[in-house]
Image (spheres, helix red, strand yellow):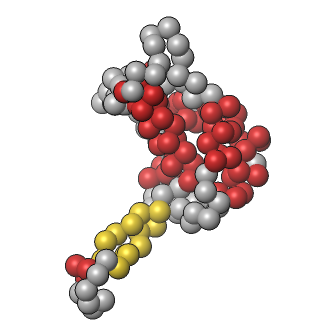
Amino acid sequence: MPEVSTVSGGTELSEIQVTEDIIWKKLMSIRMDKAPGADDLVPRFLAALSNEISVPLSIIYNRSLREGEVPNDWRDANVSPIFKSGSRAVPGNYRPVSLTCVLCKVLELIIRLVGYLEGAGLICDTQQWV
């Protein structure tokens, strides 16, 4: 059984219900100029298909939250070194940046939204978060 995880407001991740509507909204609001992750799915492509993929994504997201696991493909990342300052010949002057899949980032945004809303007291006990 996976360890219980919570968002900042105290809600267990397994209690979050992700709807097709919130997924569609997040897909439509992602920046189109972002680089794809290891899965090579570009944000423009995902936004164009948002109506068609919102339902299957809601199933995947809800199952992931309920079971505490994400699909194996979401664990892959492209790591690129980004230069900070100083000599470019010194490896310590670079920081690693991981490009994860966009669909995983969308789920992270939804979880952060729930934490923010609950932490700010914007949702009372009788309301659903979406």
The image quarter in which residue 118 lies: top left
Height in image: 39 above or below 83?
above
- The answer to which of 34 and 59 lies nearer the viewer is 34
Q: Image check: 88 left or right of 112?
A: left
In the rendered image, residue 43, in percent from the top left (x then y), is placed at 64, 57
At x 61%, y 51%, the residue is 30
As drawn, which residue projects farthest toward the top? 126
| Quadrant (top left, top right, bottom left, bottom right) of the N terminus | top left
Q: How many numbered discs?
A: 0
The image quarter in which residue 2 lies: top left
In the rendered image, residue 74, in percent from the top left (x then y), is placed at 49, 51
Residue 122 visible? The answer is yes
In the rendered image, residue 92, in percent from the top left (x then y), is placed at 22, 79
In the rendered image, residue 111, in percent from the top left (x then y), is placed at 46, 35
Residue 1 visible? The answer is no
At x 30%, y 89%, the residue is 88
At x 46%, y 22%, the residue is 122
The image quarter in which residue 97 lies: bottom left
| Quadrant (top left, top right, bottom left, bottom right) of the C terminus | top right
